[in-house]
Amino acid sequence: MYLHLGNNKMIKTDSVIGIFDLDNASVSKRTRDFLNTAQKKGEVITVGNELPKSFVVCSKKRGENKVFLSVLSSKALKTRSGYIDSL
C-alpha cells in the first residue's frame, strides 16, 4: 500500500515510522535537533513548494532514513494512510 504525500510523491506505508505535525512537534528541542541532523545528512525531502505542515519519517533498506516534509496536515496523511488506527 502507498501513501500520497502531495505533489505526486508516494511512499510505501510499510516504511513509515511516524507522521508528525510540524508545528506541534518542532516545539521540542529534540525534534528540532533531529530535523537539523537529518537536513545535514541530506535525508530531508521537501514535497511541494508551499509551507510544510507535517513531516513523515521513513526507514529505508540498509538502515537509511528519510524525512519527507509535506504540505498536507498530519491528520490528512493519517486518514490517507488508512492503516494507522491511533497516533
Image (cartoon, rainbow, N blue to C red):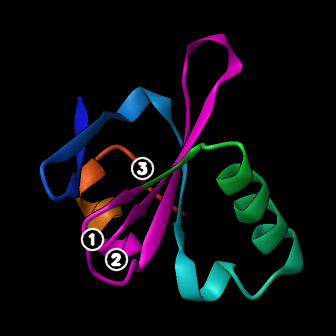
Give yes or no for contact between labels 3 and 2 (Cβ–Cβ under 8 Å).
no
Question: Measuring 36% from the left and 35% from the top, which residue is drawn there?
Answer: 13
In this view, 85 is above or below 62: below
Give yes or no for contact between labels 1 and 2 (Cβ–Cβ under 8 Å).
yes
Image spot of residue 42 (x, y percent)? 61, 44
Depth check: 44 or 5 in front? 44
Image spot of residue 16 (x, y percent)? 49, 39
Quarter of the N terminus within the rendering: top left
User: Residue flagged by tag 1: what amino acid is it?
Assistant: Ala
Depth check: 84 or 35 in front? 35
Numbered mark located on residue 30 in the image: none
In this view, 57 is above or below 34: above
Q: Name the residue under label 1.
A: 76
Q: Name the residue under label 2.
A: 73
Image spot of residue 11 (x, y percent)? 31, 36
Quarter of the C terminus within the rendering: bottom right
Please report whichever mark, 3 or 1, sits nearer to the chain's N-terminal start. Answer: 1
Q: Name the residue under label 3.
A: 84
Tag 3 secondary structure: loop
Residue 82 in the figure: left or right of residue 33: left
Question: Measuring 62% from the left and 87% from the top, which residue is drawn there?
Answer: 24
Please report whichever mark, 3 or 2, sits nearer to the chain's N-terminal start. Answer: 2
Which residues, given as a range, are shown in magenta? 46-75
Quadrant in which residue 7 is drawn: bottom left
Counting the numbered discs, the total is 3
